[in-house]
Amino acid sequence: MAISINWSTFVISIPQADLLFIGGTLYALDTEQFWLDLKDIEDDVVGMTFTDTHIRNPSLTIAGAVYAPSLVIISPYTITFEDGQYAVRLDGTNNNLFDEGIINRNQVSIIPTNSAGLQVVDTISGSVPTSSEMADAIWDEAKAGHSTVSTFGKSVTDIETNVYLTLQSLAGNVTVAGDDLTITIFDTDGTTPLRTLTMSSDGRVRTVD
């Protein structure tokens, strides 16, 4: 029995026989070998028709420090270890095999060995922000903070300002001369006219200057 994928449920099954016996009730999963096993399944005739099961980043050396490779299982795939009263240590990579939503819980105990390097840390709380917290921090930023030319935030602010000033000009510069209606649109300075529309009361005659 070998590692397999149920393509109808996207469950990756890991049999106990494929684990390295350490002693007692402790086993280990070589997650680098697990990665190779997944690649073997993915390049099969059937496997090639489905999306990738994972993302894998190799080991990296920075300033003399060697950082472990990483293995991330991608949704909708999940992991199930063959049920039983034993523990599995995840060796070889930083990975998400034990995350809720990835691991299908049963009697098997999972022992992660992830080792964190430099992380993005919230300077206020000291914790690593979630994706939703980062999105909130970006979108809830005050408009006054978006002042750098050519950035997306500044462009949105400029559009809002110009639309507001244009509507303000329309609201304050509609005049009626006899039966005719005149609308003047000013530049953002509020004084320089850009366009003047004059329309007769019956709507048949329109003059744009």
Image (cartoon, grey):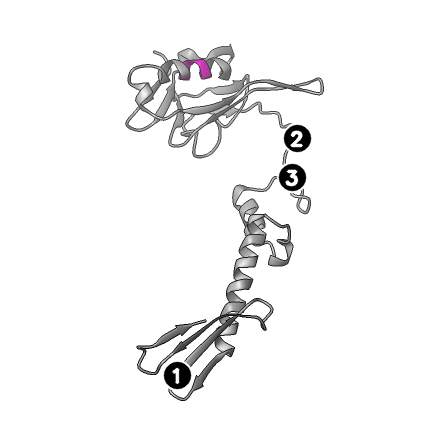
Q: Could you tell me the amino acid type at mark 2?
A: Leu
Look at the image and tell me whether residue 177 can be seen.
yes
Location of mark 1 (residue): 180
Foreground residue among 1 and 193: 193
Point out the tag, 1 or 2, that comes first from the N-terminus: 2
What type of secondary structure mainly makes up the magenta span?
helix
Q: Could you tell me the amino acid type at mark 1?
A: Asp
Q: Quadrant of residue 115?
A: top right
Residue visible at 53% across and 55% down in the picture: 156
Mark 3 → mark 1, Cα distance in angstroms: 64 Å
Q: Is residue 171 above or below residue 143?
A: below
| Numbered disc 1: secondary structure | strand
Quadrant holding the C terminus? bottom left
Residue visible at 68% across and 47% down in the picture: 124
Specify the segment rendered in magenta: 34-38
Q: Quadrant of residue 107?
A: top left
Q: Given contact means CB atoms under 8 Å apart, are the residues at marks 2 and 3 in contact? A: no
Q: Could you tell me the amino acid type at mark 3?
A: Val
Location of mark 2 (residue): 118
Point out the tag, 3 or 1, that comes first from the N-terminus: 3
Rendered location of residue 38, percent (x, y): 41, 17
